[in-house]
Image (cartoon, coloured by chain):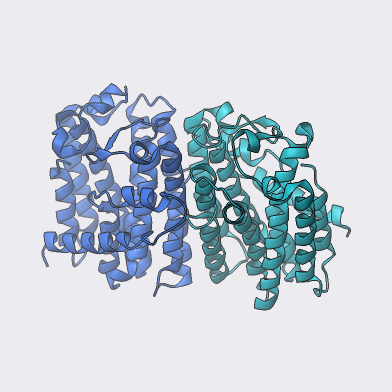
Chain colours: A cyan, B blue
Amino acid sequence: MNFKTRYAAYQEAVEAYLNSLFSKQEPYGKLYEAMRYSLLAGGKRLRPVLTLEFARLGGLDWHLALPYACALELVHTYSLIHDDLPCMDDDDLRRGKPTNHKIFGETLAVLAGDALQPEAYRLMLEAPGLSDSSKVEAAHLLTRASGADGMVGGQVLDTICEVKDAEGLTMLNRLKTGVMISAAAELGCIASGMPAERRKEAVTYADEIGLAFQIRDDMLDVVGDEQVFGKPIGSDKEEGKITFVDIKGISGCASEVAACTERAKAAVADWPAHDFLFSLADMLVERNK
Amino acid sequence: MNFKTRYAAYQEAVEAYLNSLFSKQEPYGKLYEAMRYSLLAGGKRLRPVLTLEFARLGGLDWHLALPYACALELVHTYSLIHDDLPCMDDDDLRRGKPTNHKIFGETLAVLAGDALQPEAYRLMLEAPGLSDSSKVEAAHLLTRASGADGMVGGQVLDTICEVKDAEGLTMLNRLKTGVMISAAAELGCIASGMPAERRKEAVTYADEIGLAFQIRDDMLDVVGDEQVFGKPIGSDKEEGKITFVDIKGISGCASEVAACTERAKAAVADWPAHDFLFSLADMLVERNK
């Protein structure tokens, strides 16, 4: 199966799984609707795809890893909803569509985000066919990746603290974006019971593509096409945020993205089946959205 | 050990445990400080006390249940921080002190609440001396109690939907407050491996004292002493919210609180050691804050 076909198969399974959630009628006004609006707003589904591929590479029927993969997407989605709030980045558009609070109001946007967190853990803890020890390890990993010393810490650095140098920016990106991408790969390893050495390599791979992803994101904020990118170009500059482009320049960023990609590939180069991982790394370098 | 001494021992252990959290220096501005501000703002610690007592009654060294008990308090605390936000109830005071966003600003208040959720699950999943199957069951219970069909659903009813009758009000209170109080009792049963029949009785007890608690709260909003109660008297009326007092009147509420308390006691009357549970139920009837 070639890269595009496999990626599409993963993506389709993720969409179907997410679409099955919060779909019944409920009496709490539009809570489910608000949760689904952002959950089903598309996107590359990079994180769940990573989980599913590493689950497959570890020898598991990857469908069994869908609850872990999608739990991560729920947490990612809650963070986007809250990031866009007026008291955070105050964004009107996300992936080219009005942000959650623009449609449902601020109260419901906060609550939809709040509810997505426990629902994410619920999916993991209910995962059919996976052991209790796997569930405990997986859920614990997600708590660390998304908590005070992970994603939320990164968001605090992004919104409250003035990050002024390369070191601070690297930490911000590591916490806000990197740890969740690494967790995605590691969750697939946990689901499939991957040996420790392979798991370490998987995390290195994900660390490197995560960094490449973020640097590419900063580049697209300068040289991207707004219609393709799905959010306003130049918004980082407008918000006075320092980016990798400020520090390294566009060509320096391009070199760094290439270097990260090479390091990512090197980490898994001796795996018997690394084609998908290589293509995925390349896709992130070349992406325009 | 009499009721007051035991309650104080539980409370002290809970405070010490909570006080040990998020205490190191961290680089994310005041995130930890904001989390600790609300976490250590006092309160009765009713939920963790329930967990610890049911853990003890089930034959466990109750100290082992502290991570479950305090996880619940973290989730309860996040809900209070978010409930007080300008886009929710817009409250300036909580337990007689400025609310979180009044001290730390709205951005950090949202993020402190966001971080408390994964940290709660982290505590549960790391609980020393408890089995993986216990952790999975306990964390799963907390996801259901606090998620879209639990506490957050109740908060949506409270803030977005216009609840107009006794049925709606009962559902609102059940979701917003009741399920978390019942979960507190059940978590103690899970930690100690309580037999199914006893567990059912524990939940009935907690359901009834939870309802009594909420009706008493509505009464105190009308007849309470602001200095003692810790929040403005008459705020429900001011916000146009329907309460149990509107439906049953003050004396009707008093009768209902008494009836709930009797039903709570009846559920555990044949337990060999029910003294603490009886005294706790009585304490909630008589409370002024």
How far across and how far down the image is residue A232, in percent? 69, 32
> Is residue A48 visible to the viewer in this orientation of the structure?
no
In this picture, residue A113 sits left or right of residue B88: right
The C terminus of chain B appears in which quarter of the rendering?
top left
How far across and how far down the image is residue B147, in percent? 47, 46
Q: Residue at x 35, y 48 (%)?
A: B77
Closer to the camera in the image, B261 or A114: A114
Q: In terms of image quadrants, where is residue A182?
A: bottom right
Q: Residue at x 44, y 73 (%)?
A: B131
Question: In this picture, is A184 found above or below B115?
Answer: below
Closer to the camera in the image, A284 or B217: A284
> Is residue B48 visible to the viewer in this orientation of the structure?
yes
Q: How many marks?
A: 0
Question: In this picture, is B176 found above or below A13?
Answer: above
How far across and how far down the image is residue A196, in percent? 65, 77
The N terminus of chain B appears in which quarter of the rendering?
bottom left
In this picture, residue A259 sits left or right of residue A22: right
In this picture, residue B197 sits left or right of residue A87: left
Q: In terms of image quadrants, where is residue B79?
A: top left
Closer to the camera in the image, A219 or B59: A219
Q: Residue at x 48, y 70 (%)?
A: B132
